[in-house]
Amino acid sequence: MNRRVTVYLLVVSLQILAITADNHDYVALNALKEAWENTPPSWVGSDPCAGWEGIRCTNSRVTSITLASMGLIGQLSGDIQSLSELQTLDLSYNKGLTGPVPPAIGTLKKLSNLSLNSNSFIGSIPASIGNLSNLYWLDLADNKLSGKIPVSTGTTPGLDMLVKAKHFHFGRNQLSGEIPSQLFNSKLALIHVLFENNNLNGSIPSTLGLVQTLEVLRLDRNLLSGPVPSNLNNLTRVNELDMSNNSFESSDVPPWFSTLQSLTTLNMEQTQLQGKLPVDFFSIPQLQTTVLRNNQLNGTLDIGPSHSNQLQLVDLQNNRITDFTQRAGYDNELILVGNPFCLESGGIAKYCTLPQQSNSSYSTPPANCVPSSCISDQISSPNCSCAYPYTGTLSFRAPSFSDLGNSSIYTSLQGALTQSFHTHQLPVDSVSLSNPTKNLDDYLVMSLKIFPSGQAYFNRTGISGIGFVLSNQTFKPPPTFGPFFFIGSNYGYFAGVSEGKPKSSNNGIAIGAAVGGSALVLLLVLAGVYAFSQKKRAERANKQNHPFASWDGSKNSGGVPQLKGARCFSFDELKKWTNNFSEANNIGSGGYGMVYRGTLPSGQLVAIKRAQQGSTQGGHEFKTEIELLSRVHHKNVVGLVGFCFEQAEQMLVYEFIANGTLRESLLGKSGIRLDWSRRLRIAIGAAKGIQYLHDLADPPIIHRDIKSNNILLDERLNAKVADFGLSKPLGDVDKGHVTTQVKGTMGYMDPEYYMTQQLTEKSDVYSFGVVLLELVTARSPIEKGKYIVREVRQAMDRTKDLYNLQGILDPAIGLGTELRGLEKFVDLALSCVEETGLKRPTMSEVVKEIESIMELAGLNPNAESAPTSASYESSSKGFDHPYSNNSLFSYSGAYPPLKIEPK
Ligand SMILES: *[C@@H]1O[C@H](CO)[C@@H](O)[C@H](O)[C@H]1NC(C)=O
Ligand SMILES: *[C@@H]1O[C@H](CO)[C@@H](O)[C@H](O)[C@H]1NC(C)=O
Ligand SMILES: *[C@@H]1O[C@H](CO)[C@@H](O)[C@H](O)[C@H]1NC(C)=O
Ligand SMILES: *[C@@H]1O[C@H](CO)[C@@H](O)[C@H](O)[C@H]1NC(C)=O
Ligand SMILES: *[C@@H]1O[C@H](CO)[C@@H](O)[C@H](O)[C@H]1NC(C)=O
Ligand SMILES: *[C@@H]1O[C@H](CO)[C@@H](O)[C@H](O)[C@H]1NC(C)=O
Ligand SMILES: *[C@@H]1O[C@H](CO)[C@@H](O)[C@H](O)[C@H]1NC(C)=O
Ligand SMILES: CC(=O)N[C@H]1CO[C@H](CO)[C@@H](O)[C@@H]1O
């Protein structure tokens, strides 16, 4: 009977689950979100399939993430690997995505479109991408990727395995080494190979000739050498070929020039070509643009009577051409400047002068209407309505015209762009072009504004769609423009007002929107909590009777633990919430085992400390420990959320603290600027946390490892004391101290404790004094062999302003501003580091003193800190994880022993 009920409840709960997104997907997306700034505000609630912009789902599984041009900042974490149904991942044009491309991406077997272009990704292209057998689109262009292009070996995958791929866009990176000959084979179906502007060297592998599907090949601006393989003549579909600016072996004009019958654009500037251009080259039927500047082409130029009737530009600057047969009837652009022919003919022929580089101030004019005068950042569109356009720059590498003043060319481009957006049903009203110029690379660059239709701004779906049309080469400009690329600016107006940088004029609206937004968030959260509790109620019904059914009482672990607030999690739950303890979720390790990040179904992030085999302790000790930890509840102490004691596993689940360690912030790694008032707030928070452990925790706890790495900062910069790995409760044997093996961290360690092995609360006070000195100097306790305590004592002169410590204070504290109370703060720090414990203040005295310093500085010691969001120096947000380096559990010995060693 009982069992039947359980089965029934299980079915019910599965059905409830099926309505919303898969939990793994939610957990993974949430983790991605945590690592990014500027995710869409609609990313709230626990169902990404319901209204999270940029997310598309099929059968409750996430199949597409498109977040182009959102201004995302942060890293792409390995959590992505949980989204096993993902087909499209488009994070292009965010600029701010950095860190490596996670190799875990190679597990997403369904992925067909991967666009990471125009970001700041670093590291090499993961070989595991070769495992993506369904990949069709691979765009990594315009990043900072380095290293070699990975190809398969017997044991590892490589890009040569991507037989369905049509697009390799790797341009504008720092890839190096040779292009592996193994990369290309006849099974590939590539149409675009864009490797331009990297550091690739060696020669072009002849295997490239096997990829007969190729339409666009760009190898320009690399360090390629050697001969150009002759079998490129097999690339009969290539219409755009650019090999310029490499140092190939000098060679005669290759015969394949004339056999590439699909060619429209050929650019081989500066490629050591010599000999005579064959006349039949110009009769390739679609040929439009030929740039062969800076070579050693010689003899007589003959364009021939049967040249392509589309030919627009023949640029042969700086060659050795001695004569020109004018029988051709070719009237479009021809440039022979820098050839003997022009010298001999006195430079009179029109092709012997550089075309006028008429830099134009062109700007798309209004279409038969009077431009509106718009408020705030809005701009009048060509149709004279005010809106927030999406802007960016379009660059054309080889336009076949040089007269930038001819406005009809821009009109045709504008028409083609508008047409393309409409064809793809994007909400575009009109586009305008302005300021065409030639840049240093001789690219034609102009700015593009795309205006929304229907309303004054685009939503994220619209921006992503526009970004993709411009990056996926769907848009074809008029032929005279040739190949292009687009760099979009971040679009900050999704809500119809400037996001991120609120302007005073629309603050009211921004605040209104924020308030409305957070009410909505609250509602959604409440709804989520309700749904979740309904679901869990069913699941738990059975467990409730035996909350610690898995508690193994047989092994002398005593009765069920007496817990205050901490929850007992099952192994399966924790396994699920950490994606099976995946590598991607591993955020630290130490002698005791690993620390994993997990996401509870409520969305709460947690840090899970998992003891490894051999580091587990007896059930009794574990119980004592969690009982102790569960009693610690203070806003300045990292809280225990729960534990797991099951299947020979011992795990502790802590709250996850967003802003990392104080140490990182002092080093400037977090991007949070710590001015004097913030440092005071951090000092008071940490002091209160330690005071709580000493005076209010039951039993009292000596931390034993107070240091800036063990003080974490939450999103409001509240300090939270972490790491009880070394903590000592003062048990019944309490004589005010315990005798222990000396443990702690050099530089923070109380010398008295070190010498006598007698641990007292004053040992924590000493360490805290060092932290206070660290707070004002940002120096490590021991830096270059110098001990901070001695340095400060030596440098200080109590008769002088700021005690004469200007040279040793951290400039970021706000040197030059009034640092009220700083002297008293230094006095306090030095009293904490007195030689003998007796002379040091207690933590409650420390708290009182910091409070009085704060009042002196005009701060309310009891006020909550402000949220940090407004104060981030946004671009510099660090990505060092607070829990890497074991900072939460820095003790590398055994799993925290809480036994009190007998005297
Ligand atoms: C690639 O896939 C194979 C087969 O699924 C797997 O054995 C291998 O570990 C994967 N390699 C990488 C680097 O992901
Ligand atoms: C290519 O560059 C690598 C360093 O990136 C160098 O080790 C190698 O020798 C170079 N090869 C050639 C052929 O120049
Ligand atoms: C060129 O392509 C043909 C098939 O069209 C093939 O037989 C030949 O081997 C290729 N040539 C080279 C040098 O790869
Ligand atoms: C190509 O090389 C020429 C000659 O060295 C140089 O003037 C030009 O700027 C280079 N172009 C690019 C795009 O690097
Ligand atoms: C053109 O250059 C090639 C290779 O340098 C040379 O063999 C040939 O004689 C030259 N032709 C003329 C007409 O100068
Ligand atoms: C975004 O805008 C398009 C067209 O303007 C509209 O169809 C779509 O519903 C909007 N999406 C969201 C999530 O508001
Ligand atoms: C390019 O993007 C547009 C708009 O999203 C889409 O309709 C089109 O199919 C894409 N083209 C390719 C080749 O992926
Ligand atoms: C936006 C999008 O999904 N684009 C392409 C992704 O890949 C498939 C092929 O698998 C194309 O058909 C889509 O156009």
Image (cartoon, rainbow, N blue to C red):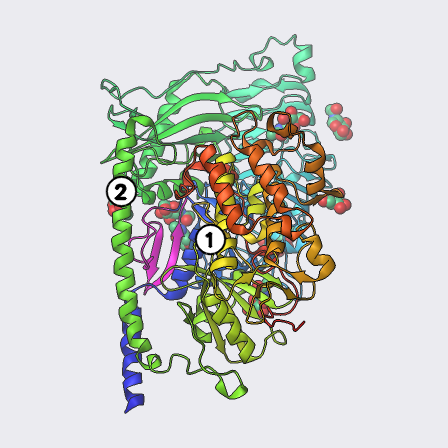
Tell whether circle 1 marks a residue whose Cβ is less than 8 angstroms from ligand 6. Answer: no
**Relative depth, front residue between 350 and 899:** 899
**Relative depth, front residue between 413 and 759:** 759
Image point 61% across, 54% down: which residue? 762
Residue 636 is tagged as 1
Q: Mark 2 or mark 1: which comes first in sequence?
A: 2
Chief secondary structure of the magenta portion = loop
Per the image, label 2 sits on a secondary structure element best described as helix
For the N terminus, which image quadrant?
bottom left
Image point 49% across, 53% down: which residue? 689
Residue 139 visible (yes or no): no
From the top left corner, tell me how far across and down residue 250 is, in percent: 74, 34
Per the image, label 1 sits on a secondary structure element best described as loop
User: Is residue 64 a member of the stretch shown in magenta?
Assistant: yes
Residue 299 visible (yes or no): yes
Is residue 368 placed above or below 783 in the rendered structure?
A: above
Image point 54% across, 75% down: which residue? 622
The answer to whether marks 2 and 1 mark residues whose Cβ atoms lie closer than 8 Å is: no
Query: From mark 2 to mark 1, how far is it between C-alphas?
Result: 28 Å
Residue 515 is tagged as 2
In magenta, the rendered stretch is 40-68
Is residue 429 placed above or below 437 in the rendered structure?
A: below
For the C terminus, which image quadrant?
bottom right
